[in-house]
Image (cartoon, rainbow, N blue to C red):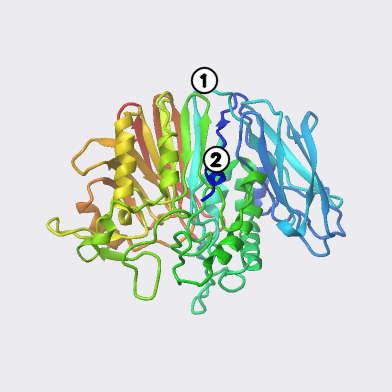
Amino acid sequence: MTRKHWRCYHGQMSRSTHSPSRRSLLQAALAAGAAPLFVRHALAADQPRFALGVASGFAQPDGIVLWTLVSGEGLPAQVAVDWEMAQDEAFTRVQARGREWAVPEDAYSVHAEAAGLAPDRWYWYRFTALGQRSPVGRTRTAPARGAEVDRLRFAIASCQRYDHGRYAAWADCARRELDFVFFLGDYIYENATPADRNPPRRHEGPRCELLSDYRRRHAQYKSDPHLQAAHAGAPWFLIWDDHDIENDWAGNVSERLTEHFERQRAAAAKAYWEHLPFPKSRRPDAWSMLINERYDWGALARIIAIDDRQWRDQQVCPKPGRGGGTTVSASICPEVFDPKRTMLGPAQEQWLAAQWDASKPWNLLAQQTLMAGLNWEPDKSKPPTIWTDGWDGYPEPRRRLLADLAARDLPNTVVLGGDVHANFVADLRVTPEGPIVATEFCGTSITSEGMRQSQLDQALPHNPQLHYGRSEERGYASFELTPGGLTAELRTVNEIWRDDSPVETAARFFVEAGRPGAQRA
C-alpha cells in the first residue's frame, strides 16, 4: 500500500452553544411523509434537479463538507452549482458561499468544502442549479481544539436494506436534536431482491457489479424521504462494510471468488464516494478509499473510526468454492488462531495504536461489527463455534487491540459497532477472566432482517459478556455523552413496513465515568 493510504486528517469536532429548536419544515415533511424538505423555488415546468436531497459531513471547527447531486434527464456536460451557508434558516446572514461544477464523470455529485466558519455553532445551507433551489439542510461545526464541552448527542446506525422495510427509524432520528450521526456500514445492499419474495418495495435492477449498477442503487436508497430528512438534519460521519461492495468481501477476495474483483471494488467505491458527504480528498484511488479517521469533540472525547474490510486477511475455513465467512467449530479450523492474521492490516493497526488519547475523558472507537465474543457452542469443555467474518474469526488481532488498550489505562473507552442485525451491549476484556477494559454498544439494523430471537436466546446464557442481545429489534442507538457518563437509548421500530411506525426506547443503559461496563438506566 502507498503512504497516502494512511494519512489521517486530524480534525476537530464540537458542540454548539447555540442549540436551535427543531425546524418546523422538517417536522412538516416527516409528518406528511414527503420530501425533499422544500422545493418551492423550483420552476414548475422543470423536472426536480435535487431529487436526492442534501447532506453534510466531516464537521471540523472551521469547515464542513456539503453534498448534493444534480439529478434528472438532459443534463449538460457540466452544471454550475452555487451553494451558500447562513447563520439563520431564513438566510438573512450568509456566512459563506461558493460555486462547484457537477460533471457526469462524478454522477453530477457535488462535494463543496465550506471553510472559514465559526467553531461550535449551527448553520443552514442550500444549493442552486439550473434555475432550481435545493432543500435546506442544517449542519454544525465543532468547538476549537481543547474547548470545554458539557454534552455530546449522537446516534449510530447501520444496515438499511431497502427491500427489508421502511425507514421509520430515520424519521425518528431526524426529529432528535443530534450533533451528528455516525453510520457504521451497509448503506446500500448490492443484492437483487429475490424473485421468490414480494416485499412492498424491491431493489431496482440486478445484483450490483458495474458502476452504473451501484449508482442506481444509491439513488434508489437516497430517494427515501426519511433518509433524506436524517441527512438534512445533522452532519454525518461514515465508514463502509461488506454490502457497500459485496457480502463478506475481504481485501481483493469476494464471497463469490470473482475474477478481477478489484474492478467491482473500484466501481462500488466510486459510487459510494459520489453519493455521500465525503471530502474531495477521499475520492477513491482506483479500488482503494481512505476510510479510517480520527476526530476530537473538543476536550470531551477522542473519536476514532477504523476500516475492517479493506486490509484484512481472507476469512479462514470458507465453504468449498466460496469466499467469505461461515459458522464453524475452532476444533476443525485451527488456522483461526494464527497470530500473523490481521483484521485491520499492519499499517492500520499501527495507526490505531497511535490515536488513543489519555488526556480526553472519553475515547470512542467506531467500527463495523460486534467485537465481543459470541460462542455458539454451549459446552465449555469444547472449542468455541464462531462466525468467521466477524472479530471472532480474528481472535489474535482482537487480543492485540484490547491488550494495547488495557496497557494504556485510558479513563473510559466505548466501542461502537453494527453489522450483525441485533442490539448487543457487552463487556470487552483481553481474556475472559480479566478486568473490563471497554464497554461495547453494537447497534441493530435500520431494516435488515436478523436471526431468530429463539436462536440467540440459546447462546446468551453461555456468553456472560453479553448483557443484552435482541435480534428481533430494528432501529438505531442514540447517545448522550457528558464528562460524567454515557447514556444510551436503543430506539426500536414497532412495525417495520409502516412508514409512520411508532419508535420506542427498548432499553436504556448508562456507563459511569471511571467504571467500565454498562448498567441498566
Q: Nearer the viewer, mark 1 or mark 2?
A: 2
For disc 2, the neighbor class at 10 Å (few under 14, some 14 to 19, many from 20) is few
Q: Are marks 1 and 2 in contact (CB under 8 Å)?
A: no
Residue 148, position in %: x, y? 51, 20
Q: Earlier in the sequence, mark 1 or mark 2?
A: 2
Residue at numbered disc 1? 148
Taking depth in this image into account, of 382 and 204 the one nearest to the observer is 382
Residue type at mark 1: give it.
Glu
Residue 173 horizontal/vertical position (percent) = 54, 45
Residue drawn at point x = 32 percent, y = 26 percent: 514
Local secondary structure at mark 2: loop
Please indicate, yes or no, whether residue 392 appears anywhere in the rendered image. Answer: yes
Secondary structure of residue under mark 1: loop
From the viewer's perspective, is 233 left or right of 376? right
Task: Report whether 292 appears left or right of 362.
Answer: right
Identify the residue shown where x is 80% and y is 30%: 92
Determine which of the numbered discs, if any, sits on residue 474 in the image. none
Q: Is residue 275 visible?
A: no
Amino acid type, callout 2: Arg
Q: Residues within 10 Å of mark 1 (few under 14, many from 20)?
A: some
Residue 100 position in % (x across, y down)? 78, 45
Q: Is residue 459 or residue 388 the one in the foreground?
A: 388
Labelled disc at residue 7 = 2
Q: CA distance from mark 1 to mark 2?
A: 28 Å
Above or below 484: residue 236: below
Q: Residue at x 65, y 60 (%)?
A: 219
Give residue 328's quadrant in the image: bottom left
The image shows a total of numbered marks equal to 2
